[in-house]
Amino acid sequence: MTEFTLWDILRNLLLATRWTIVLSLVSFIGGGAVGLLLLFARISTRKAIRTFARCYIELFQGTPLLMQLFIAFFGLGLFGIDVPAWLAAGLALILWTASFLAEIWRGCVEAIAKGQWEASASLGMGRLQQMRYVILPQAMKIAVPPTVGFSVQVIKGTALTSIIGFVELSKAGTVVTNATFLPFTVYGLVALIYFALCWPLSRSSQFLERKLNVAHRNH
Amino acid sequence: MSLIEITEVRKSFGPNEVLKGINLDVAPGEVIAIIGKSGSGKSTLLRCINGLEMISGGSISVAGAQLLDDQLHLKTLRLKVGMIFQQFNLFPHLTVGGNVILSQTVVKKTDAKAAEAMARRMLDRVGLGHKFDAYPDELSGGQQQRVAIARALAMEPIALLCDEITSALDPELVAEVLSVVRELAAEGMTLLMVTHEMKFARDVCSRVVFMHQGRVHEIGPPGEVFSNPQTPELKQFLGVH
């Protein structure tokens, strides 16, 4: 029987961690882009667009990420569309991340005083101009800490993609356990790696909150 | 020929009708003070004139620009009439100069140099040229309100709406803002102001409008309105018996 050293285990887990990081980045960046579109839709002046965005957000926040992954992976398969695991994982995570970021950012936009909208409107700015030059620059300052904080949820969310067969850190943990029969060591290391990814993000979120001094700005 | 024509304007918030048929024509260069109790509809009327509130009936036009509920008409209207608010509403993330430059470059597509020159001229006009690079939260309330005036003036409006612009200021800062307004009036700017500064209204305004329960209750030159109020409501408001 082959002997596995701790280094063998760790090396394989770290190799798989690359995919956790890539998937997290793709979800976060893609989700940010879709989330921004959703944000604009959510605060649109047209009721139909607002309703669409609200339904989208409620649907994706109101169902488990795991179900969304299953539907993206197996559901589309039922229609004869062959979806590889990485595509289903990326797509589901992007759409899921977008629904949360849009709602976080909506809160930040609505925290900006109504007078800012009125002043910029009375100077003749259109809605997009108001958003771009007046509202978003102020909202972004408030949005940074919760957005960075949410990125931790995204990283942990990628663990679920192991269930549809995407080989990232959690899946690698299962595979290595099956080969080594050392579940405690392997999952202990898996947990430590997740912690090493998430903890700095949580800390920087707290740091940014203090640095941007969100609670005490703009009077 | 009137500059601002307000005809049979009605405005309701839900079942509550706050403006019940307002008629008011303002000639170019007139300075109008709108007075009345809170809840009489004076601020709402002002906010309707540049489309911050949409009217439920009647019509408003400023120098030929109609108030209609679409972006194009609203922009045309708002380029003709500027507005100054009780809470200043400066953009806190921009410098004083940036505040005055922004709408020129974004809305009027003025090039950066010309916009900056205009901003400096307008800030000099309100006596704050030296604060060009300061941020709004480094200024006193009176200074912030003067920046807001400069910001509105930089768009070269033909009329200005002032919504209780001294009400949020400490008493000792009121005078510096009013003296800027007084100068504007002297230069022939058309002004509509909701105000509680009765002395200022008496000295500077060409007409005073007393609003009561959503209607223009009395209107006339300040001498008449203040010295010889006709209705019991205005007498009570002014505290004369």
Image: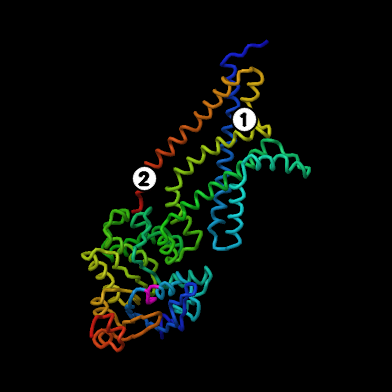
Which quadrant of the structure image shows residue B230?
A: bottom left
Residue under pointer 1: A168
Judge from the rendering whether residue A143 lies leftward or rightward of residue A74; answer left or right.
Answer: left
* Colour setup of the view: rainbow
Question: What residue is at 33 percent from the left and 78 percent from the top?
Answer: B36
Position of the C terminus of chain A, as image quadrant, is bottom left
Q: Chain of mark 1?
A: A
Q: Residue reaching furthest right?
A: A80
Instruction: Say whether residue A10 is visible.
Output: no
Residue under pointer 2: A213
Label 2 SS: loop
Amino acid type, residue under disc 1 in the picture: Glu
Label 1 SS: loop
State the image coordinates of residue B218 (x, y, percent, origin top left): 34, 85
Q: Are marks 2 and 1 on the same chain?
A: yes
Does the magenta stretch mainly form a helix, a strand or a loop?
A: loop
Instruction: Say whether residue A61 is visible.
Output: yes
Question: What residue is at 37 percent from the left and 74 percent from the top?
Answer: B39
Q: Which residues are magenta?
A: B39-43
State the image coordinates of residue A96 (x, y, percent, origin top left): 60, 44
Magenta stretch encompasses residue B41: yes
State the image coordinates of residue B40 (x, y, percent, origin top left): 37, 77
Q: Residue reaching furthest left?
A: B172
